[in-house]
Amino acid sequence: MTRKAPPAKVSISPHRWYSGCMQIRDRYAPSPTGLQHIGGIRTALFNYLFARSVSGRPQGGAFILRLEDTDRSRFDQSYVQNLYDTFKWLGIHWDEGPDIGGPVGPYVQSERFDQYKKYALELTARGRAYYCFCSSERLEQVRAEREAIRQSGYDRHCRGIDPAEAARRAAAGEPCTIRLKIPLEGEEAVTRFRDYLLGDMEWKNSDVNPDPVLLKSDGFPTYHLANVVDDHLMGITHVLRAQEWLSSTPLHIIMYRAFGWTPPEFCHLPMVMGTDGKKLSKRHGATSVDEFRAQGCLSEALINYVALLGASYEEGKDIYSLRELEERFSLDKLNKAPAIFDYKKLEWYNGMYIRMKGDTELAELCLPYAVKAGLFGGPGREPDGEQRELFVRAMPLIRERLGFLTEAASRLGYLFSEPALPPPEEFIPKKGDLAAAAALLRRGRELLRPLAEAAGDEEAEALIKDYAEKNGIKLGDLLMPLRVAVTGARVSPPLFGSLRLLGPERSLARVDRALAALAACCRGATNS
Ligand code: GLU
Ligand code: ZN
């Protein structure tokens, strides 16, 4: 079922939603406290696409990257690097950001600290925020007491302190935080906003987080303050973010009002769930882009699949390049219902993109994984010229069935080193024994040279079919022992192509090795 936004009760046309803006400016504002994961890149991608989709129109669009690194205890520079690497790999770039600058930088919150304090003080001066002098012990006690009666947050203890006295105490150096004064009376006691997807939202302020901290005692801003101040200063017109942030939005709207600023438009994106309907998490499997990359996922496939998490385009069309998405994206393609992340579906997409690649490109993509897996004579060993050529020529053998790039190494091992001799039972056809297996393999051996020298599959197939018919042997009975002898397994990439790549001599040697083993086994069986 495709759900079209906006739902009937809300009448925001996607056009009207941004028609009033000079320029669409949206942003991805990650906190670098972890690796980039599916939910994050989905948010980034939708913002990127939204800005791109309007960039041809008069208003234009700009997609901004802002690092929200105010939580210094969880910050790690390697996560910033991971962010850059991930988006470079995905081919998604921003118009303004920490690495490339822009007109309203810096784009890193830790480099903007002075601003936040100034704005917190401004709210205090406006009577919209106040100093809180409570000790952490007191706050902990309040928290515990309130939890017992199923309430959360602060008890607004310092809200009543005379502002002039509070300002004096703060100026005298008494440790304090600045808290937002949530309006509880009159017209402002209810906060309303219209979410593009969810429609009209309404909160009683008495249900909103009671007077959260905006500025900590060390002068650091909290997420709420930094986020709102920056969205305003950076001219953000549209906030497309994950639904888990919905509960902060009333606070943010209250802050915009308190500053006397116009809030941006909000669109909270549907949650991403696993196939069991629970929020996508490590329990379901890989969630970081790094893991998908390590598994041999193509960036095009990941983008294509992630772009459809919570959006529907044309009925019956699954494959979209990034360019196509840029052209087609619009807000009315977004769904309200949660998105389901299905690993099988991603594998399907990956396979589709793999099959669009030519031999050389696919080989190049698979190569780093194969090197790592040790395909060319041990982990980390680069292929020599001959191996490299063989690898390229082997691509047609695996392309059709490849789900992820990593699989190339395990599927093609038999081309690059001698496979272990399979146990004799592996050679035995249905309703047969070891002697029958050996006899069939001897028959197959006769055909081996012409098969390996055939011009292509068709010629090889005609040849072996003809032989099977003339000798009254089932084709499968002829093929199976040959396959096991040459590739080392009952299930393998196509046999004829493998024989051509290995050449007659190597193929014959493998069959002879198998015949010798089977003969030894048969002797053993008669002796005992
Ligand atoms: N820093 C927040 C995050 O980690 C930003 C949320 C928002 O987009 O407003 O996602
Ligand atoms: Zn207090």
Image (cartoon, rainbow, N blue to C red):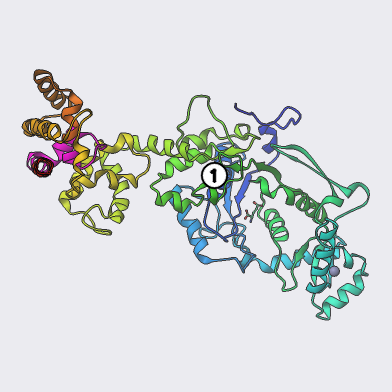
Regarding residue 221, the answer to whether it shows in the image is yes
Can you name the residue that lies furthest to the bottom here?
172
Q: Which residue is mark 1?
A: 45
Residue 472 lies, in percent from the top left, at: 12, 19
- Residue 505 counted in the magenta span: yes
Regarding residue 239, the answer to whether it shows in the image is no
Q: Specify the segment rendered in magenta.
A: 483-510
Residue located at (64% from left, 28% from top) = 4
Residue located at (62% from left, 67% from top) = 110
Q: Quadrant of residue 113?
A: bottom right
Residue 94 in the image: above or below residue 122: above
Q: Secondary structure at mark 1?
A: helix
Residue 366 in the image: above or below residue 105: above
Quarter of the image with the N terminus is top right
Is residue 237 toward the left or the right of residue 130 in the image? left
Quarter of the image with the C terminus is top left
Residue 223 lies, in percent from the top left, at: 69, 60
Is residue 176 toward the left or the right of residue 226 in the image? right
Is residue 68 toward the left or the right of residue 356 in the image? right
User: 469 or 180, which lies in front?
Assistant: 469
Residue located at (43% from left, 40% from top) = 301
Please identify the dominant SS of the magenta region.
helix
Residue 394 lies, in percent from the top left, at: 22, 40
Q: Mark 1: which amino acid?
A: Leu
Disc 1: CA contacts within 10 A as few (<14), some (14-19) or many (>=20)? many
Residue 248 in the image: above or below residue 525: below
User: 228 or 245, which lies in front?
Assistant: 245
Residue 354 lies, in percent from the top left, at: 35, 38
- Residue 19 counted in the magenta span: no
User: 247 or 505, which lies in front?
Assistant: 505
Is residue 300 toward the left or the right of residue 96 in the image? left
In the image, ligand 2 is in what quadrant? Answer: bottom right
